[in-house]
Image: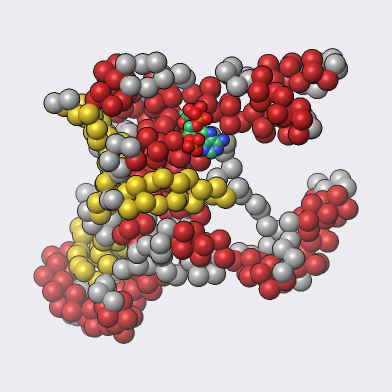
Amino acid sequence: MKDPIKGFSKLSKAAKLEWLVTNNFEDADAARSVLTGYWHDDETLQKRHDEFIENTMSNYYMPYGVAPNFQINGKLYTIPMAIEESSVVAAAAKSASFWMERGGFKAEVMGTQKIGHVHFMYTGDASALKDEFDVLEEDLRAATAELTSNMEARGGGITSIKLVDATDRLDDYYQLEVTFETCDSMGANFINSNLEEMAKCLQTFAQNHERLDANALEVVMRILSNYTPNCLVRASVSCKIEELASEGVSAEEFARKFKRAIAIANAEPYRATTHNKGIMNGIDAVIIATGNDFRAVEAACHTHAARSGSYKSLTGCAVENGIFTFWIEIPLALGVVGGLTKLHPLVVKSLEMLGNPDAEELMGIVAVSGLAQNFAALRALVTTGIQKGHMKMHLMNILTQLEATPEEKIHIATYFKDKVPHHREVVNYFCELRGVPVPKVGQ
Ligand code: HMG
């Protein structure tokens, strides 16, 4: 049993590290050596990373890859991707090249509105609340005027305020539902600050209006929603069906099976979950590389996938009049200013690599990366199967685990060039090559 510790957050980094390694590891020196081994040599840079979060002990490296040849709305991009899973970057790059030769991707932003709520309970006469709402709205706008002035100067601000009667979902439950335009920022702090100000204003309003009962009003929460159905982007590709022949499968069969694969994801949540996981492989990798909030994007995309009441595919496909069209439509609340965007040196470089896009352009790039990823996965699934390409990319991880030498790696990669490198077969071949016995399962 470990001893609990009080006041840990107040300790110095060195003291935290000592407590951590001596109380949580069998070999404190080995643990210290790994944790400090990932510290940056440049102390200023390390301090910056330390300050991103709390109780920072080390840096957790993720591979940072790039996928070239993405043609989007006629412009060529190299897309940065931070992800630990092998084959994702290769799949993105392969799809990018495939579609570059067929006219490239199209991306269109359909809306950029974000949303937030003051969630409150009201047990008084609701008709008075509704009757007085116009006056309340004026007060809410006046109360937030100072907070919104800079955003308004950039073309954004509060776009609407509504009173929502949600008592059909929960007794006495109402909302102030507020929509925002946050321009190039994701806007979380801006939205939450405004909502907190509005909540105060609502309480004061109830105290000052005789038809309202301040004692009957309780503000429960004021917070943005990460579901942003009106901050929506669509990306698509299309080509003649005959341009789709792939991996020994005829173009017609490919198009038919591909469309059916999406129909299956729409009909079966077990499959939809994996289908959308593959899409998020691409989306999360770009979101992380560009310093955006992947948890917010994940949550929004999954809510969107379930908007019909059943969890479905985020992508769609049509095969009509000899044309194959494949698209994705997703909510993406992204920022290119604020957050880590100017603080993390790799995020700065990611945005520069993309030509310093504004938030709308980045929405298009991210949606395309999800679409490209899904195309690669479905293409493999309806032709060769996923393991061939995935294991080909994963082979190096297996060989590194086996502590293969560079020469052995080349030899074994050549041997498996035209074969699926299943884990056991790689281990067997490696042992045969070294002339050592194959370890028993579990060894
Ligand atoms: P391939 O045809 O064997 O590759 O595909 P290739 O060696 O012929 O090269 C073709 C192109 O692929 C290259 O062009 C690269 O663009 C890319 P080039 O650069 O030579 O002009 N490529 C690479 N890029 C960087 N490094 C590499 C590399 N190799 C190829 N080493 C490939 C191999 C893996 C691309 C293909 O089989 C594929 O796309 N497979 C799908 C892989 C995939 O979807 N992985 C995601 C992880 S699996 C998963 O989690 C999701 C899933 O469950 C979702 C679902 O079920 O829907 C599948």
> Can you see residue 33?
yes
**Nearest to the observer: residue 119 or residue 332:** 332
Quarter the C terminus occupies: top right
Furthest residue toward front: 101
**Nearest to the observer: residue 22 or residue 84:** 84
| Residue 406 found in image quarter | top right
Q: Is residue 299 left or right of residue 203?
A: right
> Can you see residue 259?
no
**Residue 291 placement (x, y as % from top left):** 49, 59
Taking the spot 68% from the left edge, 16% from the top edge, the residue there is 425
The vertical placement of 297 against 120, above or below, is: above
The vertical placement of 367 against 314, above or below, is: below
Q: Is residue 66 left or right of residue 121?
A: right
**Nearest to the observer: residue 6 or residue 50:** 50
The vertical placement of 8 against 138, above or below, is: above
Taking the spot 27% from the left edge, 34% from the top edge, the residue there is 326
| Residue 372 found in image quarter | top left
**Residue 151 placement (x, y as % from top left):** 31, 76
Taking the spot 72% from the left edge, 63% from the top edge, the residue there is 40
The total number of labels drawn is: 0
**Residue 442 placement (x, y as % from top left):** 77, 21
Furthest residue toward left: 131
**Residue 214 placement (x, y as % from top left):** 28, 74
